[in-house]
Image: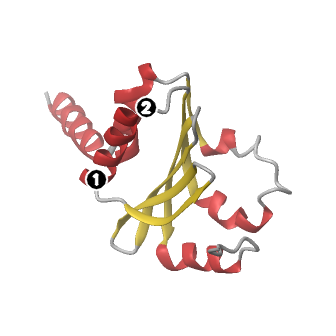
Amino acid sequence: MKNSFLILVAAIILTSCATKSSFNSFYVENKETCEFSISSPAFIANMFIPKDDVKEYEDLFKKVKHYKVMIFSDASTSLDRKFERFIKQKKYTSIFRINQNGDKVQLYFLKHKNTIKEIVLKVKSDNDYVLLGLKTNILESDFNKIIDDSAVKLTSN
């Protein structure tokens, strides 16, 4: 009896501690409608990321725990509205937006206190719609330092 009670309590505690990411909910709801989707723990995905290409963001990639990628072949307005509604409901913050020649890139993050828990990148063109979700645990000050130290600078024309 005592062992059964301890197992039940442990299961309840583990279930309550197992949090799902916000982007995960969008991923699960829309996985069937996308052309390609993949979800991978960071320790596996990081083996395939070319180190020379992302050397200046190495500190950021060390803090990523999980990647989720969704590729849609149809960049419909209903999908875009659904994603924008999701972003607003979950209270993501937009870091930047780029709109060039009809292609749009937007970067969002979800923060809890001073920690960025998720980063979502949306790339939308005429034919494609790509979402990349990163589950992370990085201090906002560390993230800002990584961006400030990077060679990539955003300029407006």
Q: Mark 1 sits on what residue?
A: 90
Q: Give the mark nearest the N terminus, 1 or 2.
A: 2
Q: How is the image coloured?
A: secondary structure
Question: Callout 1, which amino acid?
Answer: Lys
Q: Quadrant of the N terminus?
A: top left
Q: Mark 2 sits on what residue?
A: 76
Q: Would you call the spot at circle 1 few (<14 residues within 10 Å), some (14-19), or many (20 or more)?
A: few
Task: Examine the rendered structure and indicate whether residue 25 appears above or below residue 57.
Answer: above
Q: Is residue 21 visible?
A: no
Residue at the image position 44 percent from the left and 61 percent from the top: 109
Question: Callout 2, which amino acid?
Answer: Ser
Q: Would you call the spot at circle 2 few (<14 residues within 10 Å), some (14-19), or many (20 or more)?
A: few
Distance from the alpha carbon under mark 1 to that under mark 2:
21 Å
The residue closer to the viewer here, 146 or 10, is: 146
Q: Please give left or right for residue 120 compared with residue 80 in the image.
A: right
Q: Are marks 1 and 2 in contact (CB under 8 Å)?
A: no
Residue at the image position 24 percent from the left and 44 percent from the top: 16
Residue 131 image point, x, y percent: 52, 41
The residue closer to the viewer here, 2 or 149, is: 149
Q: Please give left or right for residue 97 compared with residue 148 in the image.
A: left
Q: Quadrant of the C terminus?
A: bottom right
Quarter assignment of residue 18: top left
The residue closer to the viewer here, 123 or 60, is: 123
Q: Is residue 79 visible?
A: yes
Q: At numbered mark 1, what does the secondary structure look like: helix, strand or loop?
A: loop
Quarter assignment of residue 8: top left
Task: Examine the rendered structure and indicate whether residue 119 appears above or below residue 30.
Answer: below
Q: At numbered mark 2, what does the secondary structure look like: helix, strand or loop?
A: loop
Residue 70 image point, x, y percent: 53, 33
Quarter assignment of residue 91: bottom left
